[in-house]
Image (cartoon, grey):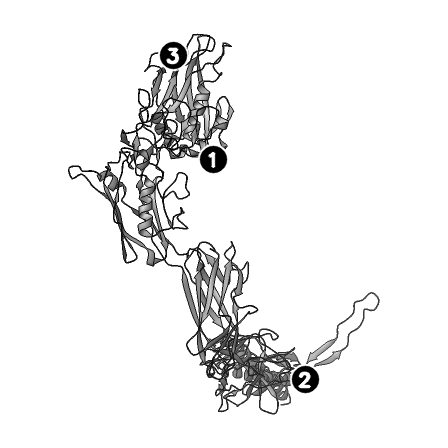
């Protein structure tokens, strides 16, 4: 009976302890960094009434008989679970996310806490405001580093610290230099001029004679030999009109392109009286030297001469002689003085009198867009009778075929051949040049050609140039070249041809040039590079010599110019940056990049300049080159043996010796060259003036950094945190402070997030990890336990009272 009383008393006493722990937990529900406690109970002892026995023989054994004598507190533990974090915005409020502890000191020893509500004292030390304990860690050296062997000590922020000046050692450049930065000149072009094709029956200006023997040897417009005959030895091919440059009488291109296949088809009666339809294929190639006869029906041609000669070769071939007879001869193909194509058929069978008529002769293109133009330009009678009366044995194409004009073309032609003989070559001029719409130019003898223009702001005017149609001597007739000379001499342009890229010329745009924006046969004027030489208000007009005539309206309309390209200056770009000497004084350094031009498109000159007070001692100029991938290939100095820029500040400070960081070959992180806008800039330098500490910041690794008035930021201190093998074994010392115990293990100091288990969360505090719901539940169970133990006492008392009453 007494045992139950004492057991109940132990229950009351220890439940009271548990309620004390619950009460403490609830009291600290809002304590920063507080860790809740927990009580565990254990049975106190047991009285043995009867021992156990092993099984005797065939009987079973018996268990011991014991009576418990109450309970005791087994342990009171600290729950080290993570508390919630609360953002405060106060830079000195620190929370730990993890299981480590802040290390603080009272000067006599180190203690540990999870409460990170720190403040600065009057000496700049980070302290706990409740007890003045100082946060521990490393102090940074003056340069912001933490040398090996730095002792752990008080964290103290030197708010009066001045960051010393640091002279610039390196300047870094990055960004793009526009590859399209070379100087350009104005590019103007007129409407295209055209010329009748006349490649066989022409006047020979080298001898002053002509030839009206259709198909015989003659001369081209430049006086070179021309012949219809052996394809392999025809020397006129290189002076003939390219097929890709042919136009019809309306000035429209026939649309023949390189690689096209032209097909010539004709029906010819063989010796057996059977009609044979024959087809030959002519592949259009670029170079006249590539022309060749592959088979009787396959040819490669580049010029109109080659096409016509190969057509003649095809028409006089043996492919249709299926009856086994001799070759058919007499078919001749040529160009008439009016620019039409003539096919003449005087052929008879060799050794016989039978004739071969040519029927259904057609020339077509396999390119759909040019098929109609080609067919119309090479259109012939349905039957060209052989060996018949004059007029029946030949057929001219109805369309005049034009080619882009050449600079050497005469602006008036001469009727060199007529129906009679000898040829008439003098005194019968006829217009030879055509406008862009295929109209004959209407310039007249004695018309005055006047040019006006502005080069920059300077007027340039010609004194006039009289047009001469050469009525008595063809050699006196005006050529296009003379007009080009007038333009060139007036505008002071060099006497050489060029392209749109190198400028500097007056020319007639040739066939198959790379620039498809300029029509073939147009007069092209390419001005000098740079804007001071820009061509403006350009006009070239012929003033009418005959007041009763409206000429030369078509000629002048064809001279209206279009500007393809405006003049611009060489690309020059500069970028500036402030550098600092060892006294902290700033100096502006400007680097100017100048493109070297079209001759060296991947090269830029650079030049360093400063303010008036400094002196550049070395490394003033140099070059940077770029590879095809746009990355820098080299960065060189003009001064021999120099690899840095040396500047004397002339203020008593040391000479600045700076390295330029421009990138690396194959890398696109520095300066690049692409065809995109220029963005090059000096993006960084490592110097700075002196500065005063303005504010601090703390990162997750516990580094306290200072921001100085000169824009420099550097570490000032390193917070350390402590880990324990058994954090639950720490002794509570009040003020949310813990100390080591024999069972906690020694503190293991480390850098947060690196060598320690926790990370710092600046501007936040860790809340208590007390869970009120849990505490209220524990309170209710503790209350029930206490009530039950009290009931045991009252019940035991009643039983004892009954026992006492037995003696009455």
Q: CA distance from mark 3 to mark 2?
A: 133 Å
* Image x and y of residue 409, in percent: 34, 36
- Tag 1–tag 2 contact (CB < 8 Å): no
Mark closest to the chain's N terminus, 1 or 2: 1
Q: Residues within 10 Å of mark 2 (few under 14, many from 20)?
A: few
Residue 671 higher or lower than 598, as above or below: below
Q: Quadrant of the N terminus?
A: bottom right
Give the SS element for disc 3. loop
Task: Kindly identify which residue carries mark 1.
Answer: 287
Whole-percent x and y of residue 672?
A: 48, 60
Q: Is residue 666 left or right of residue 354?
A: right
Task: Choose mark 1 or mark 3, whichever is in front.
Answer: 3
Camera-nearest residue between 446 and 667: 446
Q: Secondary structure under badge 1?
A: loop
Image mark for residue 742: 2
- Mark sitting earlier along the chain (3/2): 3
**Quarter placement of the C terminus:** bottom right
Q: Is residue 379 left or right of residue 442?
A: right
Residue 333 in percent (x, y) is at 40, 22
């Amino acid at each position: 009976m007494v045992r139950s009383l004492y057991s109940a008393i132990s229950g009351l006493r220890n439940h009271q302890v548990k309620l004390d722990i619950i009460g403490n937990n609830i009291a600290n529900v809002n304590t920063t960094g507080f860790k809740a406690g927990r009580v565990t109970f254990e049975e106190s002892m047991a009285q043995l009434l009867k021992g156990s026995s092993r099984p005797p023989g065939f009987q079973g054994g018996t268990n011991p008989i014991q009576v418990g004598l109450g309970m005791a507190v087994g342990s009171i533990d600290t729950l080290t679970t993570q508390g919630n974090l609360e953002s405060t915005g106060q830079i000195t409020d620190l929370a730990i996310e993890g299981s480590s502890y802040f290390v603080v000191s009272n000067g006599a020893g180190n203690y540990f806490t999870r409460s990170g509500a720190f403040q600065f004292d009057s000496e700049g030390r980070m302290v706990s405001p409740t007890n003045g304990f100082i946060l521990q860690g490393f102090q940074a050296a003056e340069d912001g580093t933490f040398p090996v062997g730095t002792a752990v000590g008080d964290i103290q922020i030197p708010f009066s610290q001045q960051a010393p000046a640091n002279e610039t050692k390196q300047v870094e450049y990055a960004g793009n230099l526009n590859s399209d930065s070379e100087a350009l000149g104005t590019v103007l072009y007129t409407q295209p001029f055209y010329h009748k094709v006349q490649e066989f029956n022409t006047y020979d200006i080298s001898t002053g004679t002509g030839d009206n023997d259709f198909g015989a040897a003659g001369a081209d417009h430049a006086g070179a030999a021309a012949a219809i005959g052996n394809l392999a030895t025809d020397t006129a091919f290189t002076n003939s009109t390219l097929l890709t440059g042919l136009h019809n009488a309306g000035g429209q291109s026939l649309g023949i392109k390189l690689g096209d296949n032209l097909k010539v088809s004709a029906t010819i009666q063989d010796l057996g009286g059977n009609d044979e339809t024959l087809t030959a294929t002519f592949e259009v190639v670029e170079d006249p030297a590539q022309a060749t006869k592959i088979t009787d029906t396959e040819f490669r041609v580049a010029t109109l001469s080659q096409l016509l000669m190969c057509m003649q070769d095809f028409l006089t071939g043996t492919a249709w002689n299926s009856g086994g007879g001799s070759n058919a001869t007499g078919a001749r193909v040529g160009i008439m003085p009016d620019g039409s194509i003539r096919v003449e058929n005087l052929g008879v069978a060799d050794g016989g009198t039978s004739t071969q008529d040519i029927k259904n002769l057609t020339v077509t293109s396999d390119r759909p867009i040019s098929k109609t133009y080609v067919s119309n330009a090479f259109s012939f009678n349905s039957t060209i009778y052989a060996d018949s009366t004059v007029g029946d044995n030949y057929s001219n194409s109805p369309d005049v075929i034009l080619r882009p004009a050449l600079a050497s073309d005469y602006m008036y032609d001469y009727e060199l051949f007529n129906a009679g003989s000898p040829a008439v070559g003098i005194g019968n001029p006829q217009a030879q040049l055509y406008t862009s719409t295929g109209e004959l130019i209407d310039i007249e003898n004695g018309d005055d050609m006047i040019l006006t223009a502005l080069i920059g702001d300077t007027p340039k005017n010609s004194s006039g140039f009289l047009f001469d149609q050469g009525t008595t001597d063809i050699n006196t007739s005006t050529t296009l070249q003379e007009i080009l000379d007038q333009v060139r001499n007036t505008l002071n342009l060099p006497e050489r041809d060029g392209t749109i890229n190198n400028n500097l010329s007056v020319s007639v745009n040739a066939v198959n040039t790379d620039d498809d924006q300029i029509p073939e046969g147009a007069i092209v004027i390419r001005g000098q590079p740079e804007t001071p030489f820009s061509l403006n208000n350009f006009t070239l007009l012929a003033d009418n010599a005959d007041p009763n005539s409206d000429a030369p309206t078509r000629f002048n309309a064809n001279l209206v110019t279009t500007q393809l390209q405006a003049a611009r200056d060489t690309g020059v770009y500069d970028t500036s940056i402030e550098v600092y000497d060892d006294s902290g004084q700033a100096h502006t350094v400007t680097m100017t990049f100048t493109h070297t031009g079209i001759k060296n498109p991947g090269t830029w000159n650079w030049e360093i300049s400063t303010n008036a007070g400094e002196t550049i001692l070395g490394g003033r100029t140099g070059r940077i080159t770029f590879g095809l991938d746009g990355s820098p290939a080299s960065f060189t100095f003009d001064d021999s043996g120099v690899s840095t820029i040396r500047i004397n500040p002339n203020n008593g400070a040391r000479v600045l010796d700076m390295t330029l960081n421009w990138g690396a070959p194959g890398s696109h992180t520095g300066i690049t060259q692409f065809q995109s806008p220029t963005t090059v800039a000096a993006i960084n330098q490592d110097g700075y003036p002196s500065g005063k500490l303005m504010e601090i910041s703390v990162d997750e690794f516990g580094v306290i950094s200072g921001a100085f008035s000169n824009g420099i930021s550097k570490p000032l201190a390193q917070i350390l945190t402590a880990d324990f093998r058994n954090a639950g074994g720490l002794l509570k010392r009040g003020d949310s402070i813990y100390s080591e115990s024999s069972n906690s293990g020694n503190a293991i100091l480390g850098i947060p997030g690196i060598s320690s288990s926790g990370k710092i969360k600046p501007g936040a505090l860790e809340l208590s990890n007390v869970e009120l719901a849990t505490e209220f539940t524990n309170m209710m169970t503790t209350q029930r336990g206490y009530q039950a133990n009290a009931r045991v006492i009252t019940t035991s008392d009643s039983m004892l009272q009954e026992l006492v009453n037995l003696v009455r």
